[in-house]
Image (spheres, helix red, strand yellow):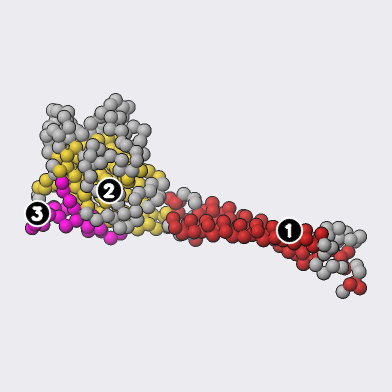
Amino acid sequence: MNRGRFPALRWWLGGALAFRLTVSLFLLSTFTTYAAADDRISHTEKGMRLQNHCLYAPYIDQDLQNRWWDFNGDSYVNTNKHVRLTRPVPSQMGWLWTRLPIGVPSYVIEVEFKVSGHPTHLFGDGLAMWVTQERSQPGPIFGNKDKFTGLGIFLDTYANSRHGYAFPRISGMIGDGHTSYDVGNDGDGQIHGACSANFRRTNIITKLLVTYVKDTYLDVKIQYKAFDEWTHCFRIDNASLPLVPFIGFSALTGDVYDAHDIIAVTTHSLVVHPKTPAEMPGIWRSSRDHSSSNGTSWFGLFFRLALFAGLCYGLYYAYQEYNRRKLYGGGGVNFNFGRAGGLGGMYENRRHF
């Protein structure tokens, strides 16, 4: 018997088994890594307060400035009440921006605001909250620049065209830096989420609550019906915002007008708790071993691809070696295992040992 036959058989069968096992693990690992990130989150809770992204009365220091915020345009400060972005007169534009970007990946922002004006005239145009890569650039989109990069939440009080929904309206758009907001149609076809809510001239404190979990979701709630009664407005799944964005507010009036006030801003980091293995049924449990960061996920994918390519190359080399031995008389894998019909036929001539 040729001594090369039995090792070659073990090599071939072992390679085939390893190939099937690697392919299965590769597909399973890839599937669980790129499963919906929200399915891996148990709950979230507020972390530390980000003081340089909070704003409270009296808003300014002894030098009539704020260490962490810039005011500009037609905005002015009433130290006992609010930062007024626009007065209830035509052709006003004002804005308010943080001087430093947010340095945490996930966060929750609570904004107390007020929109008011005369009850007998047409009112508008509205105000906006920004979480964007750019800051303090005036423009036509509620007092801010067009083609922004990041999140714009529009508290729109005036309908520029006919719609099947009511105003005032809250809508959200994630800009890519290239897409222009369609002012004439109030962003129809561009908005990622919206709701109608009569937040103008209310008898209670109106607040906006924005929760962002990095690359997972953005959730917006509003308080306008009763104190501490939050109404869900919209949610954007798989939302991805700039890594170090600025927070801003802006407002605009034209022929129609209102007073737009920012009363307080409170920003906290957000602590995200992943699900425990017991909370993740079946196949989803394997995803707990993967990092939630993009960098680690991509590294894992490239590693598996390299492993897969290496295995394919090894099998190809084994196949070439098999053909070489067969061609030069070294034998190959003899699948006719002898007259006995089993492996015993390979040992029938014991004089070769």
Residue, x 54% and y 60% (percent of image)? 303
* Residue 291 falls left or right of residue 180: right
Q: Looking at the image, is mark 1 or mark 2 earlier in the sequence?
A: 2
Given the current orientation, which residue lies at the most extreme top position?
A: 162
Mark 2 Cα shell of 10 Å, populated few (<14), some (14-19), many (≥20): some
Q: Amino acid at mark 2?
A: Glu
On the image, numbered disc 2 is attached to which residue? 134
Please tell me whether mark 1 sits on a helix, a strand or a loop.
helix
In the displayed structure, would residue 336 be above or below residue 82?
below
Which residue, given by chain and number where applicable, does mark 3 sit on?
64
Residue at 83% of width from left, 58% of height from top? Answer: 335
**Disc sitting over residue 319 in the figure:** 1
The amino acid pointed to by label 1 is: Tyr
Q: Which residues are magenta?
A: 47-72
Badge 1 crowding class, 10 Å Cα cut-off, few under 14, some 14 to 19, many 20 or more, is: few
Predominant secondary structure, magenta span: loop
- Tell me the CA gap for discs 3 and 2: 25 Å
Quarter of the C terminus within the rendering: bottom right
Separation (CA) of disc 1 from disc 2: 58 Å
Sooner in the amino-acid sequence: mark 1 or mark 3: 3
Query: What residue is shown at x 84% (from left), y 67% (from top)?
Result: 2
Q: Viewer-proximal residue, 56 or 144?
A: 144
Q: Is residue 54 left or right of residue 277?
A: left
Residue 329 seen from this side: yes
Task: Point out residue 218 in the picture as x, y percentages from the top left corner.
Answer: 35, 47
Mark 3: secondary structure: loop
